[in-house]
Amino acid sequence: MDIIQRVKQENGIVGRDHEIALSLAILNSGHNLLLEGPVGVGKTTVALVICKILGRKVIRIDADDRYTESKLTGWFDPPLVLKKGYAPESFCEGPLVKAMREGSILFINELNRMPEAVQNVLLPALDEKFIIIPHLGEIKASPKFQVIATQNPAEYIATSHLSEALRDRFEHVILDYQPEEEEIAIVKKETECEDLNLIREAVRIMRLTRNHPKVKKGASIRAAISMVNIAHKMGGGEALAQAARTSLPTRIELRDEFETSLNDLIEELLEREKKKLISPLIPLSKTNLKQKVILEPEEEGHYLVSLDELKKSLAARYRVPLAQIDGWFIAQRISEGENIFQENKLRKSALRMAVKEVMRRAWKLVGPVRPPKQKILGLFEEPYRGEVNLDQTLEKIIGKKLPSRDDLVIERREERRHQLVLIMDTSLSMGGKNLAIAALAAASLALKLHPGDFAVIVFGSSARALWHLNEENSPEELVSDILIQPARGFTNIEAGLETGLREIHSTHFPWRSALLITDGVYTVGRDPCHLAEKFPRLFVLLTEDYKMNEDLCYKLARKGRGDLFRIKGYEDLPHKILKIATLILR
């Protein structure tokens, strides 16, 4: 038996031969490894088994959003600093410095739960094999120093996207859910239950949650293990249903757009397993009105149809394949005022479908929403908040015989808020696909910013505010308002800026900016440059095309004390606008 199979057997690993072999090749090549996969697929176990196979010492970090730079690199011990100063012997090594000096493997569990500032500390260590510690100097890494990290997918709660620079320092291996037979073997091993039928039923119920249309996050293997353990203790058989009712609610997450409770969903899964119905079809029942649409009355009354029937109707009217009909297809057409969307009930149903798809894309773009933080330094005061900043405090008390409470420098992290007014063109040239893209971009900003810190101004021949600052509306409402916004008329940039100015001066928040999306060509109104300098800060996003007025956009940004950004294709607007927002919010 080779070492891989022996270590797998010793640690109870079922399957994962390909992932382990690939990970070993990456580490033996001198690279760093990032394991990504949903909760419960064994990322941590696989990582530790790989280290055992290599025979390497491991220093482990379990990351969270409270992890600090000093916890990662190390800190100076205050009593020793007072006695010896900032000497090497006064420094307490953190896990990063210790792993670098020893040439060990630094294992970071759930890397993308770390704050961005802490993640950035890793960059020079991974790239140039050294870091700089204030008062201590350069710490060089042993040639054997490597990092293995795990992360949950970015859509999970309390996680964030890794920066492009940091991801570039890792080789990426995905661990997905294992095949059904392997999961059955895992449950059998973990529970020591001999009732194979009970195990198979529990695994099937668990796996049904992973592709159900109402479920955002399905259950991990832990759910099946729990169900079998509980049912086995209760005598098996019918007890599995009771075990599922206790094991699944804490391990699955429903999609927001469905009016279904966890209990109702679990009962549906149990009934399906009982009848051996594997296909996750949505039943057409009176309780599931959000999954149905009402078409025009036919002769004697209304009738209900599924979303599939709506798609078939739209495919027939547009004369396109059924596969092309989805929420995004509708979002690109609903503003055009075509006859098909003039029927009120059909329009409402189609709009709901379009909004849902735009929001799905926006959530995917933004990922988990973690508000930016800023570091605040201040003197000690009641009530006590934060923690002592050792470096700043030590600088104040060195040489004093009797330090006072006023010498304590307290560091705390607070949410950094910034109000933003988005001013965008919705004239005739913005209809159809461009308006859908604009709705996606606006929804992404609404998700990224604090509620009430975002306003939207639209302009054509005239201008109006769709959203106001200090009003907490839902992003879904904003998307709906933009999609039904008629794209017509001329382009009056001056009217857009005037309305934006009224909005931005309606609040006295300390950090305020405006972002204008335009090609710089106005067909009515005056030259808008005289308004730019009245903004606290005005940023301009130039949509480049053959008739753009680059000079005007540059003047607007310069007079508004902002920057000029460019996009060549409107399809890139949502990605670009999020990058600009990140720069503005900093």
Image (cartoon, grey):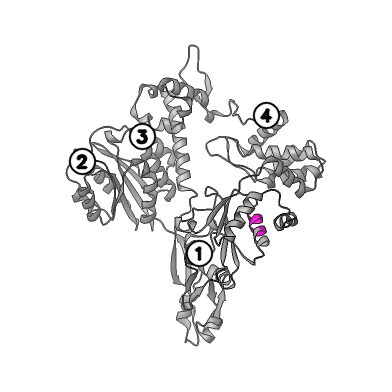
Q: Quadrant of the N terminus?
A: bottom right
What SS does tag 4 mark?
loop
Q: Which residue is mark 1?
A: 126
Foreground residue among 485 and 452: 485
Q: Dot 3, crowdedness within 10 Å: few (<14), some or many (≥20)?
A: many
Q: Nearer the viewer, mark 3 or mark 1?
A: 1
Q: Are marks 2 and 4 in contact (CB under 8 Å)?
A: no
Vertical arrangement, residue 59 with respect to residue 312, above or below:
below
**Closer to the N terminus: mark 3 or mark 1?**
1
Query: What type is the residue that disc 1 sits on?
Result: Leu
Q: CA distance from mark 2 to mark 4?
A: 60 Å
Residue 194 lies in quadrant: top right
Residue 4 location, x and y as percent? Answer: 70, 56
Q: Which residue is mark 2?
A: 522
Distance between mark 4 and mark 3 Cα atoms: 40 Å
Q: Which mark is residue 433?
A: 3
Q: Is residue 44 magenta?
A: yes
Give the spatial CA distance, label 2 vs label 3: 21 Å
Q: Amino acid at mark 4?
A: Leu
Residue 456 versus residue 227: which sits nearer the camera?
227
The residue stretch that appears in magenta:
43-49
Number of the label disc, if any, that sits on residue 277: 4
